[in-house]
Amino acid sequence: MEAIANVLADRYASEPMRAIWSPRGRVLLEREYWIAVLKAQRDLGLPVPEGAIADYERVKEQIDLASIRRREQTLRHDVKARLDEFCALAGHEHIHKGLTSRDLTESVEQLQIYRAMELVRLKAVAALVALSRRAGESKNVFLAARTHNTPAQVTTLGKRLAMFGDEMLLAFEALDQLLARYPVRGLKGAVGTQMDQLTLFRGDAGKVVELERRILAHLGIARALMATGQVYPRSLDFSVVSALYQLSSGPASFAKTLRLMAGHDLAGEGFAPGQVGSSAMPHKMNSRSCERLNGLQVVLRGYLTMTEGLAGDQWNEGDVSCSVVRRVALPNSFFAMDGLLETFLTILDHMEINHAVVDRELRNYLPFLSTTTILMEAVKAGTGRETAHEIIKGHAVAAARDLRSGKIRENDLFQRLAADARLGLDVAALERIGRETRSHAGAAGAQVDWFVRAVMHLHERFPQAGQIQAGPIL
Amino acid sequence: MEAIANVLADRYASEPMRAIWSPRGRVLLEREYWIAVLKAQRDLGLPVPEGAIADYERVKEQIDLASIRRREQTLRHDVKARLDEFCALAGHEHIHKGLTSRDLTESVEQLQIYRAMELVRLKAVAALVALSRRAGESKNVFLAARTHNTPAQVTTLGKRLAMFGDEMLLAFEALDQLLARYPVRGLKGAVGTQMDQLTLFRGDAGKVVELERRILAHLGIARALMATGQVYPRSLDFSVVSALYQLSSGPASFAKTLRLMAGHDLAGEGFAPGQVGSSAMPHKMNSRSCERLNGLQVVLRGYLTMTEGLAGDQWNEGDVSCSVVRRVALPNSFFAMDGLLETFLTILDHMEINHAVVDRELRNYLPFLSTTTILMEAVKAGTGRETAHEIIKGHAVAAARDLRSGKIRENDLFQRLAADARLGLDVAALERIGRETRSHAGAAGAQVDWFVRAVMHLHERFPQAGQIQAGPIL
Amino acid sequence: MEAIANVLADRYASEPMRAIWSPRGRVLLEREYWIAVLKAQRDLGLPVPEGAIADYERVKEQIDLASIRRREQTLRHDVKARLDEFCALAGHEHIHKGLTSRDLTESVEQLQIYRAMELVRLKAVAALVALSRRAGESKNVFLAARTHNTPAQVTTLGKRLAMFGDEMLLAFEALDQLLARYPVRGLKGAVGTQMDQLTLFRGDAGKVVELERRILAHLGIARALMATGQVYPRSLDFSVVSALYQLSSGPASFAKTLRLMAGHDLAGEGFAPGQVGSSAMPHKMNSRSCERLNGLQVVLRGYLTMTEGLAGDQWNEGDVSCSVVRRVALPNSFFAMDGLLETFLTILDHMEINHAVVDRELRNYLPFLSTTTILMEAVKAGTGRETAHEIIKGHAVAAARDLRSGKIRENDLFQRLAADARLGLDVAALERIGRETRSHAGAAGAQVDWFVRAVMHLHERFPQAGQIQAGPIL
Amino acid sequence: MEAIANVLADRYASEPMRAIWSPRGRVLLEREYWIAVLKAQRDLGLPVPEGAIADYERVKEQIDLASIRRREQTLRHDVKARLDEFCALAGHEHIHKGLTSRDLTESVEQLQIYRAMELVRLKAVAALVALSRRAGESKNVFLAARTHNTPAQVTTLGKRLAMFGDEMLLAFEALDQLLARYPVRGLKGAVGTQMDQLTLFRGDAGKVVELERRILAHLGIARALMATGQVYPRSLDFSVVSALYQLSSGPASFAKTLRLMAGHDLAGEGFAPGQVGSSAMPHKMNSRSCERLNGLQVVLRGYLTMTEGLAGDQWNEGDVSCSVVRRVALPNSFFAMDGLLETFLTILDHMEINHAVVDRELRNYLPFLSTTTILMEAVKAGTGRETAHEIIKGHAVAAARDLRSGKIRENDLFQRLAADARLGLDVAALERIGRETRSHAGAAGAQVDWFVRAVMHLHERFPQAGQIQAGPIL
């Protein structure tokens, strides 16, 4: 039987993210968890025979996935299969006392989720750093801003990048707060009452509290839920994938915009030596990485849907109707997010700006880009705002139509406006406005400075982000 | 043309939530915003003729939606229609200077969102208070907990309610933090550079900063985005609806569980005098409110999907492809959430527990509910955990099969276990375990206490929640 | 209490679609259904007093929604409220015999769905007719086709339109087949066994079959489900909205493409006299209708999500957890779809092509657009396909880079290729290829002819589509 | 680097479905496609050197995925990597002439989709056969039907199963029609104009038509799109996954209902020898397969979301923003669907009905289950329908309340009704109704017969379905 690889892990995700979700790694996390519980139980007074812990420790890295699967085929219970395997290797039956399967699996899965969120957070900082570098570099690259995909006013490329950065910072904050409040289920037993640990400790509630405290310390997560059932509430998984989705949105809007800019030859995502754009059309240099980034966001949305389907669907104290969903949605949403950030980092590394084209476009559209300022000047000169708007609109639309029909070759809007006495602005005044428009973009520069500073502070908090580099992409 | 009502607003949402999203109310919010900008511009030195502000103030409540719509039919621009209407009423053209439509609409819509989130937060506190009251009351109502929808161990009804409450608290915290960090777009102009305000103020950046500060104060929202385009990032809308969806999950799981309990006659959502359960079957008392609550969560999920489709889809500095989506998804997700919380409050008010049935079920399943404790006792007595598990499983499955086939009428599991020498537990010991099982639910009581306390602290922070009452429902 | 209108019905949907879903209209449909059942019961032998049917008929159009609502507030059962109201008006209690609420409501809702699907089908034909007219007109408008948003090869505008038309035809066929197989639930009783009709007819199964047959004839839908429960399977609603979503996709891709073309000044959706593009920037002529169309597809996706949440969630013979979902999702998905087709028709009516700009773009990119043909010619001349690809790619990428950097102003790719001896093509040959490329688009013309013919056949089947016209849009 | 397996393929899907989507299998399909095109080109007159085709044939099964990946790392183009690999193995550069990458990949992927749909169709027939067998067997197993999860009227288990079967038949028909109309993109070239094939064949359109015809014959799919761009419309992928989702709904509702029945001990999904229900609670026999089935439907919904995100998002003639989405969503939606049907078959094989419990429940609820018939009889005896409804409701609610509070132990509704003179029915009449109610379920039997017959006809059309067996499940 040919193994079918997980395509997201295989083609898009980075090695550190793959390591978090590796099947063997998971078995090891579980075994370490069992041993940690056993040690804590012993230290708190439960009888554990001499040598048992050492025996479990000794075999914990002997991981034979095929043997575990054979057990599962009979037991039809995955945890029992892994439990029996570990006990058989160690020659004891001392782990899993007072535990239900979910005490184990929820803890280990939440640990994977937590570490994966930490990795995403770090990579997001790296992406913000790269983006802020690009924004800073292009702080004074003046550009025709577009709304409705058509030229609107002047902005700078730096400000456009800061705009996507601002969105990303907002999402970063949400993820950061989620990490800070993220609770594990804790050692709550079969229906959440801790009954079995209490039985083991002959009703000593203090010891059970202490046991859970030690297990949290083992996991390295500070907070636990208080009153769960057999499972932690699945809306928590939803909130995790939702945070990822929010975080993907700034990069996705950036990527769409870069695809649009590439369509105008204004910029490109880079084209590596040896790369091929199209097997049919040799001249093609396509925005494949940007397209991939957008595709990965759609993929993430699918996993979000899966977690949506679990939230609010708990029957009584819980069951495993969520099992296959979480097996699919949790690792894969992180693989998709990781691949998305890898792709984003690659684009930020290789993005090219075609300054000559940017300038040409700006020049072509300048009279149109100036209409708001002309409107403001007319207002300052005493024309009613809506009246001036109507006049300018009339001439601008006529000029645009003549340009599009080929009737005129050069944009003569300034001449048309100067010829209209109602506005009271002569050609010289209008051309001055045009000149100023070309190299002024309001508060754009200040906004770039703000963004660069905000990211700098973040980088100081997460200096390790400096070592993150996009791996080679397929 | 017969008006078609918004069914969520009309049938499910409360009057305060409807008021936030009322069409007339929105026009008024816009007009107040325009006036606030105009005042600030004047105070910061822009020339505004004597009396203009007063004239706008005077007519601001003359709202004629039909007249506005007639204007829109020609202009094909909704803001321009409302702008022209207001100016015509006031006899001036002084508002909207240096503004783009989105300066107005984003601000007003964000204000609606913010107030609606505040209302949801308050109502969520009220629901938590009602839930904690119910949990406290039923702290000692012992109940067969179910996993996989079949009896598992003993819990208490109070703990089951606290479990859903814990989920809700988690979501509450997420919403609360979102409210605390929620930023408005601010007065950023047509492409986000504040160019037009800067032009109006002849380049005085300090004045533009101050203008925005005053507008934020008018809105009562502390924080603004720094580097947006024409629109604020739509992933922010997603994060809002996502927070609502998370908040709906605890109530939804509660409602599903109550529907399951009703199927066993254990509990019901109440049945009012005069109410009819079925037009065909006179005996029916259906969980219609619980079903509605679950339906409203599915509705909310649809609006979440809509906001997902906007996040990451910004082209350049923005456009209005989001317009119809936000017109639909934003008010309606709040109407659905509000209706869901109204329904939840109603259920919490009227829920009935059938103690006799609860007791009978507990008694019937007691030997099964005791198996974990028996397992723990066998382990303490020296049997290997997995060996004891296998033995008990064998007898329990056999007893269950005989009960289901009608071969036996009474559960004789204790006799079977006592007869198996491998376990070393006699009937007396097993019956003692059974008795203890029936009235012990581990840490359930402590968890209820914790939940009641946690909600009490919240209530102290939001004392107005005490005045929230479920309105009559359809 | 200010009424809050359904925004999709109010702003986007057409009057015929609104009429199908009108609240009063629905009450009338229900009353007619009750009367039809009563008549059939009488004709098949059940005792119905003289005059009762006439009394019901007489009052059936006296529809007082407020009175019904008052009843519902006590009964908490919407059908019972409408039933009591109708009986009170008529002074009889003879309708609804042997019926469960769902016998009534499912039938009436399915009738609304069926008629709404028929209207969508008709409007889709109208849209295809308009699209095919546009495609035919622009059959010979040569255009730079784009893949990855950058110039690829030559196509024609007509073929581009036929491409979106082909997608729409595929979806049309799916909807058409769905309409042909669409089954109603039929008169199945409280749990689907027809028990109560059988009781009424003293076990005469033949009469019950005949009763259902007559009711189907009343509805005008040929087919009924055989073995439903209280409700028809909700996956049927899903399949309806799914068919709408598929149908929205061709128009949505068209709209996105027109927005892209507008960004290059190649085409526009039209700009009506008096229209305003931006309240801030007088020169703007935005693709607002195209953006709206894309927005409406996202809205539709949200309703699709709602129906997804119902499919596969039937508990036993059914309940009303679907009720609020269907109240929201069913009418609104049709309002959204109807609005989308209205918008599409408007765009097709007013779309403008800027031929001068189209030509200029084609000329600029011509050498690039020719590379595949050059590759084919090189292959025919004996160069290995992959070798030739590599050579052409090298020169094309270099030329593109020089153009983008401003190093060259004119595309000199032909010169570069001619200078490379490995290809064996001289400038004359290359320029000949260029000339041919400019006015040849392969099978594009034949594809347009095919599309026009296919739509013509459809129009013959639905001649009434010729009367459909886009209403004025907001 | 540890390989991370595709969890759906690895744990849930069957070998035949895995084979369709195997990476090596896909490479082979591509190579066979290239060879088929090359042969057809040669047969239609293009020069292909002696032996080239044989050389390609000879090496086509030498598939080295690692080598292909190494090529891709440089080329950043997956198809070019596979093309270069195949050419290097064969020592020729003759394949892929006049092709764009998508001519190859769309065809091969559509072939995979088509074959996977055929497999799903066959397995759906097998499931329907198993379900109809179960329905036939339990045609006379009387059961308390439930609406709103509470007892409503009498039905039969066979009818309940037929009900889910009817839903499945409806979805089957939709899938069957989709297969019948499913079109491939065909050999359309880089932007859909077939320009390059026309160039190769020196403009001979007839030959290009014939070439495409031969390739369709190679694929074994009858129909092609006429006017696509570089890609076929992605709404086609949506319609495929949508058909799967519809097909999953009947089984999903069945599984939820079986979970509910298991909660009442009425039925179970079977419990294999050696199986373990819970690692903590030895007595547990959980509905894990039913829960899995429901989980797999949620998974499928996630993939549906992904395809929704592609439909209507085509820019111009297309790009690869869909690539990663389709790599994930297409195979995995089929793996999920296949796993769902495998699970369904397993449940149908092992489902157990606890007749004693079914009977006891029926007996307990009998007076309630009779209320509709009592209502019908009262109506026949002359009481107004709504009046009788009100009377019966009063007594039924009172009896239910007394039972739930423990005030009475036996249901005395018949006595209460007999004592109410307004109804005019004595105890004997009521008890007769009760007796008849217990063993009559209206048209339930006829509906089961109909279902069994309908499936029989389907089985005759797909006799191979008889060989489908559920594989062992994990």
Image (spheres, coloured by chain):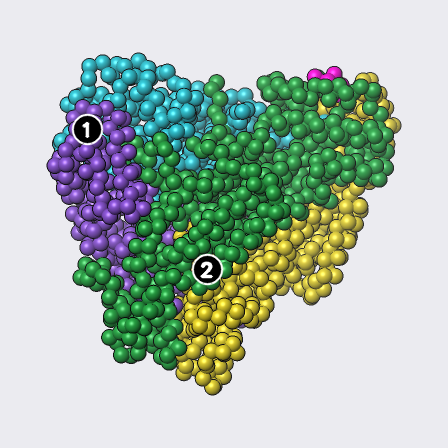
Chain colours: A cyan, B purple, C yellow, D green
Disc 2 packing (10 Å; few <14; some 14–19; many ≥20): many
Q: Which mark is residue D444?
A: 2
* Same chain assignment for discs 2 and 1: no
Q: Residue at x 25, y 44 (%)?
A: B145
The answer to whether A1 appears left or right of D414 in the picture is right
Q: Residue at x 71, y 43 (%)?
A: D223
Q: Secondary structure at mark 2?
A: helix
Q: Which residues are magenta?
A: D89-93
Residue situated in front as seen by the camera: D209 or D98 = D209
x and y percent of residue C227 in the render?
49, 58
The C terminus of chain D lies in quadrant:
top left
Badge 1 is on which residue? B421
Q: Residue furthest front?
A: B407
Q: Is residue D452 above or below residue C190?
A: above
x and y percent of residue B152 in the render?
26, 40
* Chain for disc number 1: B
Q: Secondary structure at mark 1?
A: loop
* Chain for disc number 2: D
x and y percent of residue D170 in the render?
55, 53
